[in-house]
Image: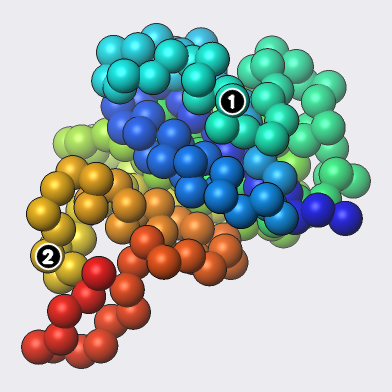
Amino acid sequence: MPQRLIVAITGASGVIYGIRMLEVLQQRPEIETHLVMSAAARATIGAETGYAPREVEKLASVVHPSANIGATIASGSFQTMGMVVAPCSIKTLSAIANCYSSDLIARAADVQLKEGRPVLLLVRETPLHRGHLRLMELAAAQGAIIMPPVPAFYNNPRTVDDIVNHTVGRALARIGISNDLTGEWGGLGSRVG
């Protein structure tokens, strides 16, 4: 059985995180990627990147329409390594936190959580008000991993790509996928990256 990872891209700013994850995983043929993009993600891809949504779809092994709540990834019997929502809008965070499965992204996340599989939410919003924090707490209480794409600087990033790669590398490692996007911390005085 292939290793499978669900990658969801929502309309929050930072769609490059999901795109970069797919680019990295495309180099790993042993991992089958299942992509779901919201309608807002398709608009944001055009606004923030040089990609077209069709180009992003070509990076995935399988693409599921966000309205298809009967897709394979909507069932717990479909084995996966988990799911990454990158970026995760507050709307999607709310749906996941409240088990409101109105689209395939929320449904797939709910299924992963009920099966005890990791669900990483790269929540992309700032500043945060108490409602946002409450939703994150609620999602975390249900087993979701809240992982805002906050840049790290101990690795001395030089470009935006360095920052994106570091976050994607950490997210993949948290799911259990080894990668060389981030270096191992060697202590103060050493260089990472």
Residue drawn at point x = 20 percent, y = 36 percent: 126
Q: Is residue 32 rendered to the left or right of residue 182?
A: right
Can residue 161 be spotted in the picture?
yes
Q: Which residue is mark 2?
A: 156
Query: Is 166 positioned to the left or the right of 142 in the image?
Result: left
Left/right of residue 69 with respect to residue 35 in the rendered view: right
Pick the residue in front: 108 or 7: 7
Task: Inspect the image, locate mark 2, and give the three-letter code of the amino acid beneath it.
Answer: Asn
Q: Residue at x 12, y 65 (%)?
A: 156
What's the mark number on residue 70?
none
Any part of residue 100 in sight: no
The numbered disc on residue 58 is: 1
Residue 144 higher or lower than 26, as above or below? below
| Label 1 residue SS | loop
Q: Quadrant of the C terminus?
A: bottom left
Mark toward the start of the polypeptide (1 vs 2): 1
